[in-house]
Every structure is written in C-alpha cells, then in structure tokens.
Image (cartoon, coloured by chain):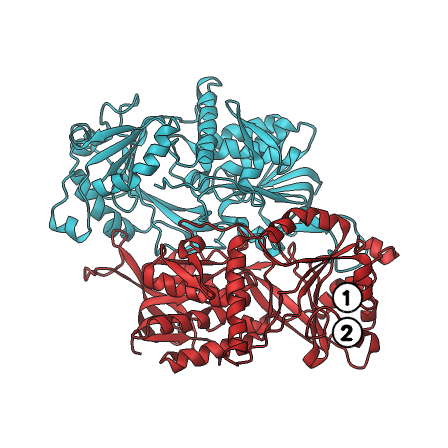
Chain colours: A red, B cyan
C-alpha cells in the first residue's frame, strides 16, 4: 500500500479528532486513518456514557474539557450540526461525610470559577420526585447507605452524542482530503533506524531508531512519516512490543438502559423540572459506589451505571471484539439495583431491557490523559473515561505535537494556550484529578 | 493451611527484607513468606547486576539508597556477615555533549553532598589501560560514537552479593520465628467484604472489601490479615485481577560474562589501579546506549550489559520460568561488542562464556519505587532495577505502612526520617529520577 505522511491508528474520538486537526493544519500532508471497525466512533467511544462536565479539580482537566465543550457547542449552534450537546447538568447527591471530605476540592473548583450550586436536603426533596434522602431501613444499614444531606449541581455539565461528534470530525477530515481505511486492524508498529547500515538485525542498540509505519493484521504494511497511536484500551498491544509504556490499563464499564414505559413515577423523575432547559432530571450521582442515573428522554429511559474500582479487573491487552465484555445482568440485579431502589424507590420493580459493556482506559497515576512521543510516533490516551469530553482539545494537542514537538504551545478552542509538554511524561506537569465520579 | 497475620508473597530482596523488618517490629505477629522458587533471592534478585550507587538526582532515591547501603555496610563490617559490599566506584565516561546535557543534574547531586570526582581525558587515559577516547574510525562513525572527554567517578558506589544479602534477611527472619514456604506459587489474591452479608456473589459493589489471603497454584489457600505483594516483575499477575494497578512493567535485561583468562591486556584493565581499595577497575559506563562493564575479580571476568529502551519489549505478564528470558548471543555480538571494542580495544577478540537474562520491573512514570496499599494489602515494587540497593529501606517502609498506614513516618537506617506516603500513589511526592544508567 502507499505511504502516508501521517497514519492515525484508531477512529475513536481521540483518533478522529486528531486526524481532523492534523489534516486541517497540515493540508499538504497525506493523512490516513486506519480503523478496525466499520466506521468512526463504533468502539468504546460509541458505547460510552457520553457525558461531559466542567467540574474538575485539576486545572489542566478544566482547560481541556472547557475548550472541547465550547467547541462542541460551537459545532452545534454556530455550524448547525447537531452533535447532541444538551446541558442537563450533573447533580452529585452527597452524605454529610462525603460533603465534608469534598469541601477542599469543592472550594478549589469554586475558586477557579467553576459554577456549582449547592442544594440542601429539602430542595433536593422538592425537586427530585420520590427521592429517599433518609436511609434507615435494614437494607440501607446492611449496605452502609448514608443519608443524602446535600446536592452539588453543575449546570455547565451535560450530555452529547459521541457517534455524531465522531461523524462531524470524519466528514471534515474527508472533505479536506483525508483518507479513511475501515475494517482493517493495525497489528504492529514498524520500526527502522534513522540511518540504515544495510546490515541484518537492525535496529541495533547503538542506532537511533523510530517508528516508520504500521503492519496490518492481514500482513500488509503502510509506511508513515509519523504514526499516531490512538487505540484507547488497545494502546498497549502496539506499544509494549516496541518497549514504550502505554501508561494505561483497561477496565470494563457497563451501562444498563432501564425503560420508563408507562410508569408514572419513573416518568415524573425523568422529567423533573427546574434543573435545565431540557426539562429533565440532571445526570444524577448517588452517594454510594459512584452509582449514576442518566436520563435519556428521547428514548424514554434511564441509563444506570457505576464506577467500580476494587475487584473490577484491569486488562492490559483487551480482546478486539467488545462483545467479549458484555454487561452482566447480575451486576445490575445485586449491585446497582440494590442501592438504586433505596434512594429512588420508583426503580423498585424496574429492570433493564438493554445493556452493554465497554472499556475505559485508565491512567491511574494522576487520572489525566497523555500525549507523548518518540521518533516517528505520537501517542494519545489515558483519558480514563473522559475522552469524549476532552477529545477536541487532545486532537489539537496531537497536531501541535506533530508540528512543533513536545515543547510546543497550542491554542485550544476559545483561545486558551496550553503547553503540549504538560501531557507528556518527560516534563509532565498536570494537577492530579481528585474529583472522580 | 493455617492462617497468618501477614503473608509476604515473593522472597526476592524486597519480599525478604520486608518480612525481616515486619517480623522484627511485630514479634507477636505470625509472618509467612511464600516463594515459588527453592530459596530466597533466586529469581531476578540473584540474576541482577548487583550494583549500588548513591548518585541519584532524586532526593528520595538518595535517601532510600544511602540508608540501605549504610545498613549493608553495617551488616558486613559490624555484624561481620559478608554480603559482598565492595565500593569499587562507578565511572561514567562521557562525551562533551553528554556532560553538558548532564551538568544540571550533576550540580543537583553535588549540591546535595553526593561525592563525585570529575576526571579529564588525560586522567582517564592514564588510569584506564587501553581506553580509546578518540572515536574517528569508520565503525565509530557508523555507530555515531562520540569522543570521551570526561569521566564522573562516584567513589561511594559499588557492588554487593544479593544472594548473600537475601540469605542474611532470611536467617534473621527465621531466627525470629518467621516461616518460609518455598516451591509454592501464589496464583491469586483472596478477597472478602469487611462485613459479610452471607449472600452469594460477595463482595458486592456497595461493600467495603479487601484482601484476605492468598490462593496457591496447587489450589490451597492461606488466610492473612495482611498480604504483602513483593513479586517484582510478576506483581501485575496478582493485582490486575482485583483491579489494582501494579504501576510497573517488566523488561528483559541481559548480562554477558566475558572471561579474562590469560589475556594480559584484559587483566591489566580488570586490575586498573588508583580507583578503589579493591584495586580494580570501577563499574564503567560507556557513552553509548548505557553500555556498562563490571569487573568481577574473584571470577576473573567482566560482566557486560546495556540498558536498551526503545524496541526492547515491555512485558505485562512475564512467564514464571526465567529461563524463558535467556540472554541472546547475537545481542552481545552485534550490539554490545561493536561498541565495547571501539572504546576498549582489548575486548576485540573477547566473547562471553556465560550469559543470563532476567527481568527489571519498571515504573516508567518517575523511575521511582512504590509502596502503597488497600485494605488487607500492601504492595512494594516498581524499583526499576534498583531493588537490591534500596531493598532495606523499602522493607522498613513496608513495615511502617503495616503498623501505621500510608501516613506514617519511618526511620530508615542511620536515623533518616521518611514519610511512607511519599512512595504511595494517593499523595505521591517523589522527585523524578533523571540520572538513569
């Protein structure tokens, strides 16, 4: 196959956003995106919870997310392309203990200008139909559920449609002359010395060497001046063999779609008033195990999920077929539903009618994404489940890295300057994120 | 099998040093060490290069290494147990470019009281028999070898015998009542909720849960109040399944033993004068690819090795049998020897007569070791090839973590205070190490 100046591996949100910005800013370069699935955003991007927030303690996380969200709003409102941006807000329900443990982080956010509205128990009761703030049943005691005494509402948070967002980038990329190669999987990175000696066994340890292209699973190879690895959960598969640490591991995440049907109490909850212009419940985070409830009014359902940490395995080399990571009905039944029905009794008889699994790619060191490189190689990832909401910013950083290297500066959407070296590992300089779902 | 208060998994230097200090400071606790091999220090500890140094840019690295080295000297000189401590020194040979790039780090070390002697080219030539500082041959040009213009000599660096050191800890541990279980492999960590409900499927996501013991490969289980995971390159195998990031990956490292035999020029090099009390060449690091030469006078040989980074694969889940990671004769022939003979022509006709491989466990984020925990669990590792030289300090930190948790303070040997939280991941606070071999 022909060579390209740039080959981007992976057409999830990080890959396709990178490809878009690379082609836009380097119009004379040939750019190819190779994707193992049949279109953009069909892997973990399309399976994601698709929420965004500006509530982060880390300055860099706020910058990355703020800029990307502004750009997504710009796509939707100025460019008139519907990518599903809907600022329904996030509402953290908290126990007294949690609130007091969070105060420090909360103040950091407030002092940085993040809009957060505090709500008391009575306000929560009046706004969230049927909520049970008082946890004194036997079941609640067994699960150590705590009373809800406060809510933290972030009005600038919301949801979007990641598949439509990925399609926006795809169309722009192709319109500018970028090439997409679907249903082909990159199996390995090709390497070569900067200056070949012609001897067998290259590269030798005394040679400077770098990445020179990709090898596909079917045996074909594609040469590239620069390869951008944006494979999310699968980054290690390409990077470990060439001795580069991918700094992330995957974890299965599950979503359970619970139909509202004609249940009046669920419907009332779905369309809870007074939070947002959509006239729906905000994205709700319960005060136990990161359990969350997302209202999806267009399909008349809730999505329920949870961020389990301990005892949810890390996966260094995930399988390519995401069907190997299905949602587990018992996980809903014995884990999520038990907690959910205590705080929101209208879910008592509810069961999911659809469910799916996907993979988050965690950089557990500081819970922050990375962009770093080697000769002929740029790697983006480690977004720890927040790739969609930072995708545009990370794509711009990949492009800046391509043009100017690790020390370059990029202007994120909205004019925010950002140093690419901050997300690298040589001079990494990011505030650790402490506001985890 | 019976339960223990503490089960330490792995009897490499980190495991056995931890067990020793745990038993010494918690004499009433029952402590078991489980090791897959037949004795202590028989895995990567015994295969290591067994060098130690006090030349680090990271304050924490200096504290850890200084204290451990002082303790090893104390064992040898005061306790009269020969653990092979021999301060032969490290000598970095540098090109002008390397020296100038290193000046900043070098000054940091000097300002911190690290003894470093700078040597000029003529001094190097007079002290290192046969050294070729001038690299202008065709071969040198092909390999981009640079002239040696300076040497940095660290007299407080040296070598020791890691198997004897591990045996010292083993004997002390057993004398205090500790129990060793050899030739048994821990295959998994057992987990349980803090408070059981009696229902099937525990632990549920709404339960606080932790590690409660170990499962052996043969199916037996051992209960434990606390499990210390000190498996080095194999940490991920136990940690990933329970969703805990081991923050390290393994890489193969190789050592090639080149016999001196009756070769006069090699002998002269081995016994180079004026560097140390042993009357040998110091540990020599060449200005290319981290290639090093270690004099081993008692066996009349040199050990040659190299720290290859790019294109040396990372291994997330190494095989248990280290024979699967053999040294590669061609690696010596076409990589190391090519460089070695240019700087030290007396190696021209030399070939190794023994060679072996082993695994380093790298924490590539800051190149610093870690000690962190979860309920019922303490993990130590990520030493990135410097476990032997910091083993005593890390063992003391594991014990302090056991007694006082992550926030506790420990007194390292020699009275140096150290906060255990510095090496954890919640409040990690270590200077990144910039002085890599």
Asked whether the residues under the numbered discs 2 and 1 touch, taking CB atoms below 8 Å apart as contact, a structural biologist would say yes
In the rendered image, the quadrant that contains the N terminus of chain B is top right
B81 relative to A128, above or below: above
Residue A64 lies left or right of residue A324; in this view the side is left
Query: Which chain does the residue under circle 2 lie in?
Result: A
- Look at mark 1 in the image and give the residue it sits on: A337
- Residues A149 and B380: in front is A149
For the residue labelled by badge 1, is the local secondary structure a helix, a strand or a loop? helix
Disc 2 to disc 1, C-alpha distance: 8 Å
B338 relative to B174, above or below: below
Give neighbour class at mark 1: few <14, some 14-19, many 20+ (Cα, 10 Å). many
Task: Determine the residue positioned at 43% across, 32% down.
Answer: B62
Spot occupied by residue A323 in the image (x, y as percentages of width and height): 59, 74
- Look at mark 2 in the image and give the residue it sits on: A351
- Residues A210 and B188: in front is A210
Spot occupied by residue B242 in the image (x, y as percentages of width and height): 62, 54
Query: Which chain does the residue under circle 1 lie in?
Result: A
Residue A324 lies left or right of residue A131; in this view the side is left
Task: Determine the residue positioned at 51% across, 31% down.
Answer: B392
Residue A394 lies left or right of residue B215; in this view the side is left
Residue A263 lies left or right of residue B104; in this view the side is right
B423 relative to A353, above or below: above
Task: Determine the residue positioned at 88% across, 57% down.
Answer: A137
Spot occupied by residue A365 in the image (x, y as percentages of width and height): 53, 51
Count all numbered tags in the image, as a single digit.
Answer: 2
């Amino acid at each position: 196959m022909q060579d390209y100046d740039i080959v981007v591996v992976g057409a999830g949100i990080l890959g396709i956003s990178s490809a878009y910005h690379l082609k836009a800013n380097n119009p004379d370069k040939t750019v190819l995106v190779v994707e193992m699935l049949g279109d953009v955003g069909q892997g973990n991007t399309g399976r994601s919870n698709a929420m965004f927030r500006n509530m982060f303690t880390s300055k860099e996380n706020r910058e990355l997310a703020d800029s990307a969200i502004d750009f997504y709003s710009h796509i939707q409102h100025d460019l008139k392309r519907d990518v599903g941006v809907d600022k329904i807000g996030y509402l953290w329900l908290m126990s007294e203990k949690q609130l007091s443990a969070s105060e420090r982080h909360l103040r950091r956010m407030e002092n940085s200008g993040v809009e957060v509205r505090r709500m008391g128990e009575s306000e929560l009761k009046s706004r969230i139909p049927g909520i049970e703030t008082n946890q004194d049943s036997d079941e609640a005691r067994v699960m150590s559920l705590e009373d809800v005494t406060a809510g933290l509402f972030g009005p600038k948070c919301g949801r979007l449609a990641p598949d439509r967002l990925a399609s926006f980038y795809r169309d722009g990329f192709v319109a500018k002359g970028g090439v997409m190669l679907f249903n082909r999987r990159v199996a390995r990175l090709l390497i070569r010395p900067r200056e070949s000696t012609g001897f067998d066994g290259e590269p030798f340890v005394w040679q400077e060497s770098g990445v020179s292209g990709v090898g596909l699973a079917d045996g074909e190879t594609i040469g590239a001046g620069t390869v951008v690895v944006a494979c999310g959960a699968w980054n290690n598969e390409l990077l470990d063999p060439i001795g580069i640490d991918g700094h992330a591991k995957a974890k299965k995440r599950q979503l359970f779609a619970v139909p509202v049907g004609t249940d009046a109490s669920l419907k009332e909850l779905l369309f809870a008033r007074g939070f947002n212009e959509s006239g729906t419940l905000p994205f709700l985070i319960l005060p136990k195990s990161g359990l969350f409830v997302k209202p999806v009014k267009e399909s008349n359902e809730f999505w329920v999920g949870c961020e389990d940490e301990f005892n949810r395995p890390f996966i260094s080399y995930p399988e390519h077929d995401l069907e190997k990571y299905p949602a587990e009905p018992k996980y809903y039944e014995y884990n999520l539903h038990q907690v959910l029905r205590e705080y929101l009794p209208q879910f008592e008889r509810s069961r999911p009618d659809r469910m799916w699994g996907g993979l988050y790619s965690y950089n557990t060191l500081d819970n922050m994404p990375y962009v770093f490189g080697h000769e002929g190689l740029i790697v983006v990832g480690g977004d720890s489940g927040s790739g969609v909401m930072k995708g545009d910013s990370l794509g711009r950083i990949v492009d800046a890295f391509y043009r100017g290297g690790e020390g370059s500066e990029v202007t994120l959407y909205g004019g925010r300057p950002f140093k690419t070296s901050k997300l690298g590992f040589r001079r990494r300089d990011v505030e650790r994120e402490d506001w985890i779902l």
